[in-house]
Image (cartoon, rainbow, N blue to C red):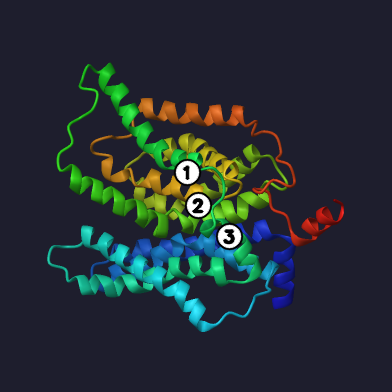
Amino acid sequence: MKQKIEEWIRGHPIEAFFLLTIVMSFGLLFPAILIIRQEGVLGQILSLFLGRIGAYSPVLAGMFVARIIQPGQQRISLTRRLSVFLPVWFIAAILHTVILNLNAEPGTPLIALLVVSLPVALLPAFVISSAFLGADGVKKMLSTLVRPKGSIVYYLVALLTFPVIHIVGMGITNVLNRNAWLPRVSQGADLAFTIFITFFSVLLFSGGINEESGWRGFAQKRLQAKYSPLVACLMLWFLMVIWHIPNDIVQYQHGGYLLVRIALYPFITILFAWVYNRTNGSILAPAVFHASMNSMNPLMGIFPITTAGNILLVGFAIIVVISDRMWRKLPGDHPAVYQDDATSACDASSV
């Protein structure tokens, strides 16, 4: 039975990835939603754990499938493993503790928040260390997360696109309404600190490496071996909408779902894919893009999403599609296109 499942996964890696990702998401996030509605600290902690693991389903599913496809692994000493794993675990635990402290009840002991954060921090520590020390297929999948490629220009684009769109969109809206171009910002230092912490929290826990390592590093790379980037984007958008359903039940219970997921998310997906391709298949670039997008949430009260901002976003995505001719299939040897070892060996022998 196990052998047959592994054979099916090797023959259908994309289907296996999406199936496993969505099953993990629904199986963990729906219970998390139900538990968080119950009173009690233990329920909130359990909901947090389930939610964090569920959010990691894209990268964990990708790693699982990649390991089955390419299981070989070098022997590595425990000392070397710990030298990579422990620093990431420590940094992630401290960061997660700070995030919990920002949202905790006044007087909550930091040691209690750290105890809660330690198991959560195992997730990014496991993924990042696996990029160095995992199975051959996993290291191949995650390599650009720890060894990014491409021009720094596109990393700056990833970092600044959403802040610029929010601020310029708000400015245009204010001018049209005959208000001041930009609102006054009080407590700027506190707000900057919150944005900084939010950015790295998203990067490590809720939209950065946990999602983009799977969506881009595993799925998009393989889809682009068969389809054009534009078609791959639309397929990813549809499946990502399904994956986000548990989260969206909570996030958009007061409206806005159709605007964000149906109207805007296809264009956001295009921009993520464009940055991924422009950096020669670097996972870190869309991970930064995702973290930058979500870190704008603390600014919503000052720079809310506006119609002008949405038009700028859609316009940018359309320009990207046209300028890169994203309806055309990428060359087979493009770094953002998946090549199995057999294909690579054939290409090398024919040179």
Label 2 to label 1: alpha-carbon separation: 8 Å
How many numbered callouts? Answer: 3
Identify the residue under disc 3. Answer: 143
State the image quarter where residue 9 is shown.
Answer: bottom right
Above or below 222: residue 73: below
Of 80 and 15, the residue lying toward us = 80
> x, y percentage for residue 166?
34, 33
Callouts 2 and 1 close, C-beta under 8 Å: yes
State the image quarter where residue 187 is shown.
Answer: top left
Label 1 to label 3: alpha-carbon separation: 17 Å
* Residue at x 27% of width, y 45% of height: 298
Q: Is residue 152 left or right of residue 294?
A: right
Q: Which mark is residue 155?
A: 1
In the rendered image, the quadrant that contains the N terminus is: bottom right
- The residue type indicated by label 1 comes to Tyr
Crowd around label 3: few <14 · some 14–19 · many ≥20 (10 Å):
many
> x, y percentage for residue 21?
55, 60
- The residue type indicated by label 2 comes to Leu
* Residue at x 36% of width, y 65% of height: 92
Q: Is residue 1 left or right of residue 193?
A: right
Label 3 sits on a secondary structure element that is helix
Tell me if I can see residue 1 in this picture.
Answer: no
Which residue is the extreme one toward the left? 107
Marked residue nearer the N-terminal end (1 or 3) = 3
* Residue at x 46% of width, y 78% of height: 82
Above or below 251: residue 113: below
Of 330 and 223, the residue lying toward us = 330
Identify the residue under disc 2. Answer: 284
Label 2 sits on a secondary structure element that is helix
